[in-house]
Image: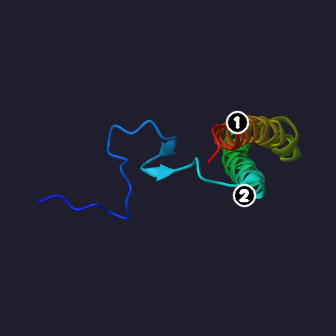
């Protein structure tokens, strides 16, 4: 017996965009911008944590490296790159949906 779940005909082989089963293609313009900022902030803070931990280990081995370098040379570029990539991805999905007439 097959049941329809909310009228959706999207099966496992669906061509819709998604990560880990979460659809990423139904967002509006503002939501796409907000999701891009969210991903870039998460990337910034995660890389900051990992960079500070790495510098702490590196300094523990007898070297001297400034902790501000973790922001300047690792976290800020990673956050900017992620912002550009996520903006391109989410705005492409939004534009494709608008041009398709959905």
Residue lying furthest bottom = 6
| Label number found at residue 55 | none
Out of 36 and 98, give the one closest to the viewer.
Answer: 98
Q: Residue at x 50, y 50 (%)?
A: 23
Where is residue 65 drawn, in percent x and y?
A: 83, 38
Where is residue 75 drawn, in percent x and y?
A: 78, 43
Out of 13 and 77, give the one closest to the viewer.
Answer: 13
User: Within 10 Å of the Cα at label 2, are there few (<14), some (14-19), or many (20+) other Cα atoms?
Assistant: some
The mark total stands at 2
Secondary structure of the residue carrying numbered label 1: helix
| Label number found at residue 92 | 1
Q: Residue at x 88, y 40 (%)?
A: 72
Q: Residue at x 48, y 53 (%)?
A: 22
Q: Quickly name the residue at label 2.
A: 31
Q: Residue at x 78, y 37 (%)?
A: 74
**Is 24 drawn above or below residue 65 in the view shown?**
below
Marks 2,1: beta carbons within 8 A: no
Where is residue 12 drawn, in percent x and y?
A: 32, 43
- Position of 35 with respect to 14 (left or right) is right
Secondary structure of the residue carrying numbered label 2: helix
Q: Identify the image quadrant of residue 1.
A: bottom left
User: What's the coloring here?
Assistant: rainbow
Out of 71 and 44, give the one closest to the viewer.
Answer: 44
Out of 57 and 98, give the one closest to the viewer.
Answer: 98
- Position of 19 with respect to 59 (left or right) is left
Q: Distance from label 2 to label 1 (Cα)?
A: 13 Å
Nearest to N terminus: mark 2 or mark 1: 2
- Position of 10 with respect to 35 (left or right) is left
Residue lying furthest left = 1
Where is residue 47 drawn, in percent x and y?
A: 70, 45
User: Within 10 Å of the Cα at label 1, are there few (<14), some (14-19), or many (20+) other Cα atoms?
Assistant: some
């Amino acid at each position: 017996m097959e049941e329809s779940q909310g009228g959706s005909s999207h099966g496992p082989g669906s061509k819709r965009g998604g990560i880990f089963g979460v659809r990423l293609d139904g967002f509006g313009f503002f939501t796409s911008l907000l999701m891009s900022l969210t991903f870039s902030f998460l990337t910034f803070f995660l890389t900051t944590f990992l960079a500070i931990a790495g510098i702490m280990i590196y300094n523990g081995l007898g070297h001297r490296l400034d902790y501000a370098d973790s922001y300047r040379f690792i976290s800020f570029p990673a956050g900017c790159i992620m912002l550009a990539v996520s903006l391109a991805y989410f705005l492409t999905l939004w534009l494709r949906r608008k041009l398709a007439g959905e």
